[in-house]
């Protein structure tokens, strides 16, 4: 992408309305535009990151055996009356009437709809286990939308729903999601710690929140700091194997949100020098809720014994749009964002130090073409801004690598490569630079 043809409306000044660094940087880097309280348009740079995150989530869900579908944002109120949640949900639910006076709502979550789909088709245990997911916009009319995309009203969530014949099988489904979550967040460069959590309005008796540590987080957390050193599960983890011992490594170390914190246990289990009490951002949550929805909505299947029984369910959410802010909270410096390569909107920022200088233009065009041909995403700053402004802009938008090409270096046969995360700059031959960026 040529910057001269891109839409990147960056801001020089810090926007006054942004209280936390990720919100500030997302506005300054031209990633989002607020359209109403808690409702954002995603501009090209932000949208690319959002899609990259969604794709990592998708790959790990698929690897764990979940199947993607897409449900609508609007749902019938009557469906929610079946579970009793239409009245229970309260003012957070956006309720709408169509021209025929039919009551609809903008979905805050999809347990009812997926249960309706399931019960319409699945009659036998032979179809189980089944895990269906989608990534779709949700609406919750939050009392206090704030911190940009962190607590929005309209936000993008991946939500998955598992269906199993009994509790033991449902726990295996829960474990698969637990492991998939460890992997997806690690791939985004995050340390997301699974913590024992309250089940809230989804209901049920087993739940973990995946939380990244950050002072600006909304949840108070208590952990044994050894949990920060646990390695994520490998890519070839066998989802058909027994995952309990893998999960036990994580759940044996104390980690709980303040809602379920047990001070006596914390002190008994965690040596004093390993106790950490801080704040965190919830990026995902997994629930096992048993037959809560299948009882209310009559979703049952015939077992091997010929007897019908209500299925055991779980649901598994990931805050895809919240993650964009969460990753920035975890990875930035005073100059701007530092994207982990896996989610970066472009891998390389190519800076032309002297546009209209024939040799420099030629060298830049050559690099631009070669990188693109090698499948490397590049944002090529071909504008006639001054060098200082170009550097500041690249630092702000946080691409992992900056490749700086100017007449002075070209004379001695070198280009400069800067690593955004470490700040390290090296001069090397164009060939060596190309090799490094395409490796
Ligand atoms: N208002 C919101 N804005 C952005 N992301 C949200 C919001 N509410 C929830 N999420 C994300 O969706 C995920 C699943 O939501 P869920 O656990 O059902 O919601 P909550 O924790 O608010 O009860 C959360 O872990 C969080 O990452
Ligand atoms: Mg939650």
Image: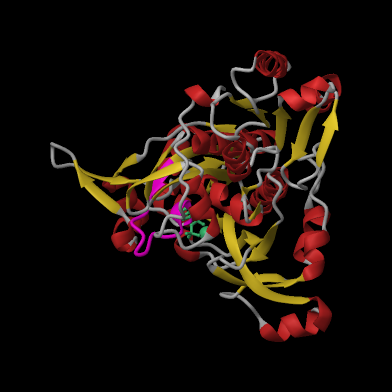
Is residue 195 part of the magenta span, yes or no?
no
Q: Is residue 141 visible?
A: yes
In this picture the colour scheme is secondary structure
Could you tell me which residue is drawn at 65 percent across and 29 percent down?
351
Q: Position of residue 390 (x, y in %)?
A: 59, 36
Relative depth, front residue between 386 and 253:
386
State the residue lying farthest toward the left.
Answer: 100
Left or right: residue 301 versus residue 90 is right
Residue 407 horizontal side relative to residue 309, left or right: right
- Closer to us: 419 or 205: 419
Comparing 228 with 313, the one in front is 228
* Magenta stretch encompasses residue 144: yes
Query: Would you say residue 66 is visible in this rendering?
Result: no
Whether residue 304 sits left or right of residue 15 in the image: it is right
Q: Which residues are magenta?
A: 137-150
Residue 213 rendering spot, x and y as whole percentages: 66, 63
Relative to 269, is 437 above or below? above
Quadrant in which the N terminus appears: top right
* Side (left or right) of 158 relative to 223: left
Q: Nearer the viewer, residue 101 or 436?
A: 436
Residue at image location 78% in from the left, 32% down from the top: 416
Where residue 98 sits: x, y (%)? 18, 39
Q: Residue at x 69, y 19 (%)?
A: 360
Q: Position of residue 233 (x, y in %)?
A: 80, 47
Residue 261 to residue 94: above or below: below
């Amino acid at each position: 992408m040529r910057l001269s043809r891109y839409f990147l409306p960056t801001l020089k000044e810090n926007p006054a309305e942004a209280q936390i660094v990720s919100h500030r940087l997302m506005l300054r880097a031209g990633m989002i535009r607020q359209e109403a309280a808690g409702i954002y348009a995603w501009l090209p740079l932000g949208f690319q990151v959002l899609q990259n995150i969604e794709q990592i989530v998708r790959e790990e869900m698929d690897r764990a055996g979940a199947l993607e579908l897409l449900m609508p944002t609007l749902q019938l109120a009557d469906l929610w009356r079946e579970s009793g949640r239409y009245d229970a949900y309260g003012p957070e639910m956006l309720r709408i009437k169509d021209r025929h006076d039919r009551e609809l709502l903008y979905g805050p979550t999809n347990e009812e709809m997926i249960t309706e789909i399931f019960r319409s088709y699945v009659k036998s245990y032979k179809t189980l286990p089944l895990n269906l997911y989608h990534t779709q916009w949700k609406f919750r009319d939050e009392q206090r939308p704030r911190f940009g995309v962190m607590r929005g009203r309209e936000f993008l969530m991946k939500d998955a729903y598992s269906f199993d014949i009994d509790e033991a099988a449902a726990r295996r489904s829960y474990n698969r999601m637990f492991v998939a979550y460890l992997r997806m967040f690690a791939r985004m460069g995050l340390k997301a710690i699974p913590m024992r959590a309250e089940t809230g309005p989804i209901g049920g008796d087993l739940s973990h929140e995946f939380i990244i540590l950050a002072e600006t987080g909304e949840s108070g957390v208590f952990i044994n700091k050894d949990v920060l050193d646990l390695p994520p599960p490998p890519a070839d983890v066998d989802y058909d194997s027994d995952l309990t011992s893998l999960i036990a490594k994580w759940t044996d170390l104390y980690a709980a949100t303040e809602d379920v914190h047990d001070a006596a246990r914390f002190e008994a289990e965690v040596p004093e020098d390993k106790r950490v009490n801080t704040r965190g951002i919830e990026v995902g949550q997994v629930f096992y809720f048993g037959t809560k929805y299948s009882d209310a909505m009559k979703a049952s299947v015939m077992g091997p014994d010929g007897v019908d029984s209500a299925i055991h369910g779980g649901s598994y959410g990931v805050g895809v749009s919240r993650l964009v802010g969460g990753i920035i909270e975890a990875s930035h410096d005073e100059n701007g964002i530092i994207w982990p390569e896996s989610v970066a909107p472009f891998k390389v920022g190519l800076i032309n130090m002297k546009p209209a200088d024939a040799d420099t233009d030629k060298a830049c065009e050559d690099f631009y073409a070669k990188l693109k041909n090698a499948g490397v995403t590049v944002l090529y700053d071909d504008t006639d801004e001054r060098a200082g402004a170009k550097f500041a802009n690249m630092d702000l938008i946080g691409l992992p690598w900056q490749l700086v090409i100017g007449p002075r270096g070209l004379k001695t046969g070198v280009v400069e490569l800067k690593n955004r995360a470490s700040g390290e700059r090296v001069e090397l031959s164009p060939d060596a630079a190309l090799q490094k960026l395409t490796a």
